[in-house]
Image (spheres, coloured by chain):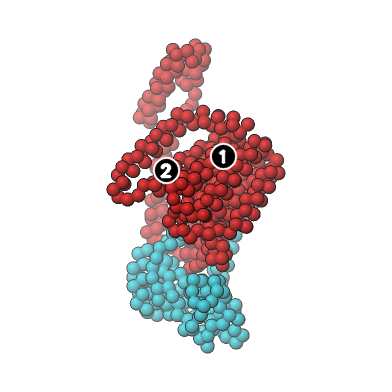
């Protein structure tokens, strides 16, 4: 019984620790976004948005869950990992859209309307950290160049 | 406390009145009556009203804490949120373990259920703090994986039922995200899922006879198969586009049949009813896939669907599972109501049909209440 109760706690703690470490490491990049605000049954309020990578990713013609790399330097999308690109983001094509796991930012309910308006108005950008493999993690949401927390 | 004592005295007075009636009617002799009387007057009874008020108070405090935290959620540091979460999870887990050692069954089961729910809440909190996005199957598979031990340990059916439900939902979400969804279609998945659950349930039963998780798999298979049968029936009426892959459904039905054939725990009669259930389900599904929307086929599908549920009810009665038996009979009743609703359409008949539906449900409940025990015994006799 002890194992059944201890293992979930340990795994969940290490999961949180892993995400914390990853968020703090890697190259920091700021990307412009535009989006909307639905409700998530699992984790409260969040904003989802379309990230502007500056490159044309042919997801409409791509197969489901096909992996793509976007090189932010050359603004090109390839299915093979680019060799000489210090800033690249890895993602998959789902339902005709490129997703890199950074399309959601959780916010307090009271700030939902304000952030929704700003995001829709094209005044928002996203700070992400990217590791060598192109895996991106969300770090902060900027409104007119300042963290959303400073815009309260 | 004065009110509580008065309340207790009222209950005792009612008990004594009933006892006196039973003694006068000859159900109890004088000796038994005296012994019950002596016991009722001296035994310490649980103070349900007191417990109720304490629960109300504790619930109110808990709601107040949750509301306060929610109001200040944005101002609480992420590290604090995570620390408090993991501390709470550990305390609940520790309580479950302590209560299990001390043989406090109710507390142990309650803490296990809270621990089970707290795990998915923790996954939600981590995804909120680190802004993780992904498909529904990812947190659900993680949750079911983490809590498999808890689902196996529990002695009640509650956690296993939630667990099997979450696993089925995760499988559905995963299927949606694979190319199979387009090539095989949803009908194939819907028919396959209950078969897979039943195969897992019967296989588990061979190794752990009395595991609640086994019963949850089998009950899940039964509920999903009925849901699938209803969806196929409705699809057959309205869309005329239902398709399925015969090799997969017949392959899975054959595998389940073989498993039942070699199952060491069931007698011949029980196996025969299980085979009948599978056969009825397969024929119902095939008829629905033929997409005949006319009244003859709709009645045929209803009869076959009820045949499937009745076969399962007889099998469950033979195993002595009164709760599952009653659940299946309830499902059969719901199936009848659904068929009836699908027959009546249009606003002009809406009022009358609602009245008839209401009367039908009331009649069914009254009949069920009156004859449920006799029905259970009869079905038990049929299978033996």
Q: Colour of chain B?
A: red
Q: Which residue is mark 2?
A: B337
| Image point (33%, 43%), residue name | B353
Q: Position of residue B321 (x, y in %)?
A: 57, 36
Of all chains, the one bearing label 1 is B
Q: Is residue B299 above or below residue B28?
A: below
Q: Position of residue A97 (x, y in %)?
A: 48, 74
User: To which quarter of the image does residue A144 belong?
Assistant: bottom left
The one of A18 and A123 positioned closer to us in this rendering: A123
The one of A36 and B117 positioned closer to us in this rendering: A36
Indicate left or right for B168 with B358 as reference: right
Residue B311's mark? 1
Whether residue B87 is visible, yes or no, is no
Q: Colour of chain A?
A: cyan
Q: Is residue B266 above or below residue A22?
A: above
Element class at badge 1:
helix
Whether residue B294 is visible, yes or no, is yes
| Crowd rating for badge 2 (residues with CA inside 10 Å; few <14, some 14–19, many 20+) | some
Q: Position of residue A88 (x, y in %)?
A: 55, 81
Of all chains, the one bearing label 2 is B
Quarter of the C terminus of chain B within the rendering: top right
Say whether disc 2 or disc 1 marks the residue closer to the N-terminus. Answer: 1
Q: What is the spatial separation of the Cα atoms under label 2 and label 1, in whole angstroms? A: 19 Å
Q: Position of residue B276 (x, y in %)?
A: 60, 42
| Image point (51%, 45%), residue name | B305
């Amino acid at each position: 019984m002890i194992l059944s109760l201890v293992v979930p706690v340990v795994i969940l703690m290490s999961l949180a620790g892993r995400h914390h470490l990853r968020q703090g490491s890697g190259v920091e990049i700021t990307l412009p976004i535009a989006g909307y605000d639905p409700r998530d049954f699992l984790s409260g309020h969040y904003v989802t948005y379309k990230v502007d990578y500056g490159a044309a990713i042919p997801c409409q013609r791509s197969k489901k869950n096909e992996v793509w790399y976007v090189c932010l330097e050359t603004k090109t999308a390839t299915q093979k990992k680019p060799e000489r690109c210090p800033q690249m983001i890895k993602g998959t094509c789902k339902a005709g859209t490129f997703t890199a796991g950074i399309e959601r930012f959780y916010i307090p309910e009271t700030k939902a309307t304000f952030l929704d308006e700003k995001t829709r108005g094209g005044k928002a950008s996203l700070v992400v950290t990217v590791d060598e493999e192109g895996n991106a993690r969300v770090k902060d949401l900027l409104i007119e160049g300042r963290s959303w927390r400073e815009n309260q | 406390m004065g009110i509580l004592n008065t309340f207790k005295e009222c209950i005792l007075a009612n008990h004594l009145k009933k006892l006196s009636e039973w003694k006068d009617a000859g159900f109890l002799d004088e000796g038994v009556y005296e012994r019950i009387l002596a016991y009722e007057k001296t035994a310490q009874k649980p103070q349900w009203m007191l417990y109720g008020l304490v629960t109300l108070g504790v619930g109110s405090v808990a709601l107040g804490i949750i509301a306060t935290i929610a109001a200040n959620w944005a101002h609480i540091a992420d590290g604090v949120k995570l620390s408090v979460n993991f501390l709470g999870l550990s305390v609940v887990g520790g309580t479950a373990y302590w209560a299990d050692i001390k043989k406090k069954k109710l507390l142990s089961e309650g803490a296990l259920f809270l621990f089970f729910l707290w795990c998915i809440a923790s996954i939600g909190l981590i995804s909120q703090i680190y802004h993780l996005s992904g498909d529904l199957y990812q947190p659900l598979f993680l949750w079911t994986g983490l809590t498999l031990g808890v689902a196996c340990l529990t002695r009640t059916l509650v956690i296993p039922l939630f667990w099997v439900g979450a696993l089925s939902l995760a499988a559905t979400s995963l299927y949606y995200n694979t190319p199979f969804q387009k090539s095989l279609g949803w009908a194939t998945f819907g028919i396959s899922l209950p078969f897979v659950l039943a195969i897992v349930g019967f296989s588990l039963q061979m190794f752990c006879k009395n595991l609640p998780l086994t019963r949850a798999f089998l009950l899940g298979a039964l509920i999903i198969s009925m849901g699938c049968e209803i969806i196929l029936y409705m699809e057959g009426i309205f869309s005329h586009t239902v398709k399925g892959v015969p090799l997969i459904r017949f392959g899975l039905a054959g595998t389940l049949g073989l498993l039942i054939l070699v199952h060491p725990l069931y007698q011949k009669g029980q196996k025969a009813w299980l085979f009948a259930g599978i056969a009825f389900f397969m024929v119902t599904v095939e008829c629905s896939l033929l997409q005949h929307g006319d009244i003859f086929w709709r009645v045929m599908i209803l009869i076959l669907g009820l045949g499937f549920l009745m076969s399962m009810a007889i099998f469950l009665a033979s195993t002595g599972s009164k709760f599952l038996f009653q659940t299946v009979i309830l499902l059969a009743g719901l199936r009848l109501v659904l068929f009836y609703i699908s027959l009546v359409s249009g606003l002009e008949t809406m009022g009358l049909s609602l009245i008839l539906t209401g009367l039908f449900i009331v009649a069914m409940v009254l009949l069920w209440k009156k004859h449920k025990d006799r029905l259970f015994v009869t079905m038990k006799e049929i299978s033996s």
